[in-house]
Amino acid sequence: MSNSSSISHFLLLALADTRQLQLLHFCLLLGISLAALLGNGLIISAVACGHHLHTPMFFFLLNLALSDLGSICTTVPKAMHNSLWDTRTISYSGCTAQVFFFSFFNSAEYFLLTVMCYDRYVSICKPLHYRTLLGSRACAHMAAADWASGFLYALLHTANTFSLPLCHGNALGQFFCEIPQILKLSCSKSYLRELGLLAVGVCVLSGCFVFMVFSYVQIFRAVLRIPSEQGRHKAFSTCLPHMAVVSLFVCTAMFAYLKPPSISSPSLDLALSVLYSVVPPALNPLIYSLRNQELKAAVWALMTGWFQKH
């Protein structure tokens, strides 16, 4: 029996048992992380450099790209290091940092997706009030509130989780540090306090989800009233990428955490954890750029301009 003060490191779940599979996972994670870095980096650069993209929709997209970069840089480098060097350890402070930043970037991303839904709602349902409701000051305040809420959420959960006594060893059933896995190591009833915080967080996130669903009901009703087919197509084109990103982000995480124990297995749990923690940051830039001609043109201009200079 040990407590958290005597734990100097944690043991993460190995991605594979054989050396060949470990190297294969390293290569896959490297490819996914490079795709995420390239895609999100291009979006950030294109929006920052393209003055015609200085609109609320692209401003929030830039913030989303920043959260995606932060999220994948929190979990993947350590997993790649462990796969390459055939190790499972992560220091106590490193685990604390992973829990904080993973909670921070993912909660901030969810709040950003909620604000982006509000942007689409105002744009389609209240177009005459768009500049009033989503001026530059209002957008800056909403983005700051998103990041501040994510920071507070992560700080409360991280501080509370690592204040619990840990006496069930130091082996985590996950390839990165996350709160549910650390709670399993606690032997104190005070973990109920963290469960209470998690319940409050779930209520807040559920409220955001209900808001998004309600907003999209209103959006679809407004779109169906647009007389021209071209207008309806344009409106749907601005909404579909956001819906796809929300679905990918929410559905994978919900299935990973709420799936029945009867279908749970180590390989399935590992695949789902990769699906909700690693894949979305790499796919989000692709989803947003596929149906947005302005963004594609800006990214293409940025890339051709770079190649011409070099």
Image (cartoon, grey):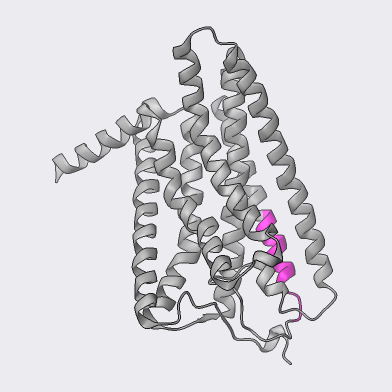
Depth check: 211 or 240 in front?
A: 240
Quadrant in the picture for residue 306:
top left
Position in image of residue 276 (x %, y %): 54, 56
- Magenta stretch, main secondary structure class: helix
Q: Is residue 160 magenta?
A: yes
Residue 76: which quarter of the image? bottom left
Magenta residues, as a range?
152-165
* Left or right: 25 as drawn, with respect to 116: left
Residue 124: name its quadrant.
Answer: top right
The answer to which of 201 and 290 lies nearer the viewer is 290
Residue 293 placed where, x, y %?
Answer: 36, 27
Residue 271 drawn at (x, y percent): 52, 64
Where residue 187 sits: x, y (%)? Answer: 79, 81
Residue 108 is at least partly visible in this image: no
Q: Quadrant of the N terminus?
A: bottom right
**Residue 224 vertical position relative to residue 288 in the rendered view, above or below:** above
Residue furthest out toward the bottom: 1
Residue drawn at point x = 51 percent, y = 57 percent? 275
Q: Is residue 34 visible?
A: yes
Q: Residue furthest front?
A: 262
Q: Residue furthest top?
A: 227
* 5 magenta-colored: no
Residue, x 70% and y 40% (percent of image)?
Answer: 208
Figure check: 80 above or below 282: below
The answer to whether 241 is drawn above or below residue 271 in the figure is above
Q: How many marks?
A: 0
Q: Which sits in the foreground, 114 or 136?
A: 114
Residue at 55 percent across and 63 percent down: it is: 273
On screen, residue 269 versus residue 14, left or right, reads right
